[in-house]
Image: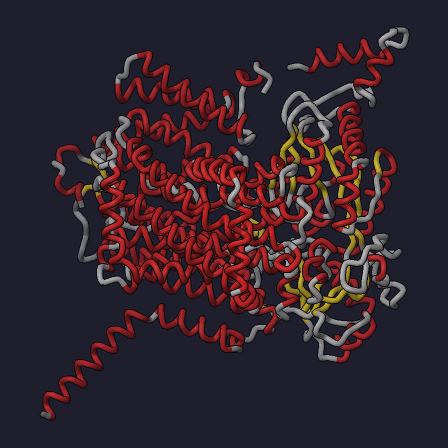
Amino acid sequence: MEQKQDSPAGGGLSHSAAEAIASLAIIAIGVVMIVSNYKIGAGWASDGPQSGYFPLRIGVILCFASLVVLLKSLFGKQHEQGVFVTWQRLKPVLLVLLPTAMFVLAIKFLGIYVAAALFIAAFMRVMDKSIWWKILLVSIGVNALLFWMFEIQFKVPLPKGPLEALFGY
Amino acid sequence: MNELDALFHGFAIALTWYNIGMMVIGIVLGIIIGVLPGLGGPNGVAILLPLTFTMQPTSAIIMLSCIYWGSLFAGAITSVLFNIPGETHSVATTFDGYPLAQQGRAGEALTASFTGSFFGALVAVLLITFLAPLVAKFALKFGPPEFFAVFLLTFCSFVGTGKDPFKTIISMMLGFGLAAVGMDTVSGELRMTFGWSELLRGIDFLIVVIGLFGLGEILLSMEDGLAFEGKSAKINTRVVLETWKKLPKYWLTLIRSAAIGCWMGITPGGATAASFMGYGIAKRFSPNRDKFGTGQLEGVIAPETAAHASGTAALLPMLALGIPGSATAAVLLGGLMVWGLQPGPLLFVEQKDFVWGLIASMYLSNIAGLIIVLSTVPLFAAILRIPFAIIAPVIIVVCAIGAYTVHSAMLDIWFMLLFGIAGYVLKKLDYPLAPLVLSLVLGDRAEAAFRQTMMGSKGGLGVFWSNGLVGTITTLALLMLFWPLLAFAWRKLRRSLGGDADSAA
Amino acid sequence: MGLPIYKFFNNVCLRPLSGALLACAIATPALADWEPTKTVEIIVPAGAGGAADQMARTIQGIVVKHQLMKQPIMVINKSGASGAEGIMDVKDAKGDPHKLMAAFSAIYTLPVAVNLPFNWRDLNPVAMIALDEFLLWVNAETPYKTPKEYLAAVKAAPPETFKMGGTGSKREDQIITVALDKVAGTKFIYIPYKSGAEAATQLVGKHIDSNVNNPSENIAQWRAGEVRALCVFSAQHMVYKDKITANQSWADIPTCKESGVDVEYQMLRGFFIPSGTTKDQVAFYVDLLKKVAATPEWKDYLAKQALKDVFLTGPDFVKFLEKDEAFHNKLMNEAGFAHKE
């Protein structure tokens, strides 16, 4: 694991803790699968397996396998002391993730093209400190190209907002 | 040689300036469609179908089939460069294609994938030319038990021994679970929708893949500092020639994948299943099997050859039987009817010009396609030189568009984001993602085939050995599954026998 | 955005004293008070290449070829969950006059089968443009020449020996199968496939014993002499007299009823737009479809697919829908396909 080489000074989530959290989440998914498929019938009827037959068993296997991973992560021999991700390294990840989430949220209100232009511009500004004309060129140029491609050439409608409505789209 | 005469007649029809122009337009359009995630062969062809209503049927099908070839070729481009499959059948190409690009060998990976594609197409076209009626009959032998056996074979050929078998199992089961969301086609019942009508349509495989691979990859590279590795990709024509020199070494992989592809296209198991099976079998029997996933040319050639062979062979059952072997073939089938042609067993008899014109055009357009895509290799490899701060947000935007276009649903973009995070975490925890994708793609089809079989056999499992064909495939699948165990036993046995011989001597 | 301008233009045209009335009337013969202001989407709640999709694309082709509309028109497949995806999409697009849904009997069967919160009254009916027929088909290599013979053989065998293939589960094909079982006292195993095309090939490959496909789904195999049509589930013979096989036309196929199997079923092929749209908007599409139906290409399409040429709109269409819905509800409940919770 590359994380091991990090200086522990950064601090962060330990590898085994991350492993345990992930397997707990997967166990939760498995339990949901078991319960919801039990409800619709998971037996073997006269005409073969019912709707819930396979998903229920998949849920059971999922729970079992995750349990093993969980136990291994807590008590296993290869108990990983390493750090899963340091807070320092998590920062740039969140720096992409949060704006992306905001971009997705903005699509609903602004349409995908305007939201994408703002997103690209902001990203370039923060990450690269690009100069303004480069930012404008890329953010508007890329979206104009996408618009031309999807809306005009291939006639695939993407979510649009007030700006496109202004032009009658 | 009746077929040869007919083929030359076909060349005479296909080789007009107008038709060649249509070919080039079709291939270029197909490449664009193949590169954009979310726009694939089926909808690309469907979108352009109305344009062809006023054209000659032969020219129209030449153009539309060229869009299909173009998209088959180009699906690999984004898989290799950005780890985002442009088409569903190029998922398996990411496994080794992307690591190659990271090592600065993007040009090599692309050349190998295009050439493999071309080889697969060529084998499939030869098959269509000379064995069409025979092969079409074979397709009719496939009922639900045979389909299930084929899917089982795909799974079994792909299940390798991962680092941690439990994580492999978890990954595969997550894929099956996701595939089960939505309406169960066999009983018409809803599963795991939790009363949410947005979940009715299920979770499309493309959305998961775009999230896991595309967005997940960007998050990982953010953590490693702001860069895609592999900026120094060599991008000149020498790379093409050098790669070609290496290819004959992989003749067995090429032939095996082409055979798998032809078979899966005709039966019809589909290009996606074919590419996974091609990759899985190449991995199982390769001397470098441990290095698969770290950037092996063989791992790029195997899935691409199979996918293109399958995509091409899928046209055969469409022409000869009127059953589409793939989604794109289904749309082309609709086109045939609109043009006033009746697909089916009589097409070869009644519409000789059309059929042989199309078959001849397949030879020509795949050659044209190879030339066109190879000349774009430098262009696409150059994309890797764009600074990360520019390319990353653009990729995220394209991912969002790709996720949205699958169902025109906003929710799918959120799902993509969610799977992006999941991909980041799972990859860091060493969960293999390939089994998840495979079971997501084939899970519900395999389940449907199994349950259709059970309905017919009234719950008897003996049906999977009820005739020679299905019995052979099932047995082969089980052999594949237990191959490592068998190989181990065989070695043990031989050693002990050898030991006996020694002691006897 | 462009809407007020169109309104204004049409108002001028409509003013009776205006001398320009005649010219205007020629320019817009139907005097529709509304016109699409952007691309019109035909939503097909079925997969690309299927019967509903082919119809939508044929209409698209005709509209483009004859320039029946200023704005572009495109077809979008939303086939998820047996079409529920497309149906819900159009339901949720309240007040959007640029969505046209290609409807078939899923609008009645889906809500009953999976408790989908949908009723066709949630949409504005535009017009029904055709009725699709269903036939009973067997493999041509079997000895059965009439439905009576075939059903007698099914009855003579132990129950659940003969396999009937069809499209999907708890839908039109299975409804017909259950109705057959009831009338003839048989017990088929019903095997659901993804599409009619698949059911057709499976019949040729003898993986099933019969199917109840639409004419368009089985025509290729019929022409090639691989399958045999026993009867049509309709009150009258079909009208198309051109020979399709060596010695049979669609019109030659007897009805099931006159062959002693009293099962009738036909499926609507119609169009809806979302609710919350105005009368003018509905009128525009009625007019558009009328123009489409009058073209030779459409007649040709009907003949090729052996569809029944019926055009219903307005109150007649609503009346038909009410009757058809009651009919489907009855069949679905009798067959035990209704959603249980």
Colouring style: secondary structure
Q: Position of residue C75 (x, y in %)?
A: 63, 36
Q: Position of residue C250 (x, y in %)?
A: 81, 57
Above or below, B423 against B297 in this view is above
Q: Is residue B46 left or right of residue C190?
A: left
Q: Position of residue B496 (x, y in %)?
A: 17, 83
Q: Quadrant of residue A117?
A: top left
Number of numbered discs on residues: 0
Q: Is residue B48 left or right of residue C23?
A: left
Q: Nearer the viewer, residue A44 or C284?
A: C284
Q: Position of residue B232 (x, y in %)?
A: 20, 34
Q: Is residue B450 visible?
A: no
Q: Residue at x 41, y 61 (%)?
A: B260
Which residue is most to the top? Answer: C18
Q: Is residue C184 left or right of residue C58?
A: right
Q: Residue at x 83, y 62 (%)?
A: C253
Q: Is residue A73 visible?
A: yes
In the picture, which quadrant includes the N terminus of chain C? top right
Q: Residue at x 64, y 27 (%)?
A: C72
Q: Nearer the viewer, residue B53 or C132?
A: B53
Which residue is most to the bottom? Answer: B504
Q: Nearer the viewer, residue B322 or C339?
A: B322
Q: Residue at x 21, y 76 (%)?
A: B491
Above or below, B363 against B466 in this view is above
Q: Nearer the viewer, residue B332 or C96?
A: B332
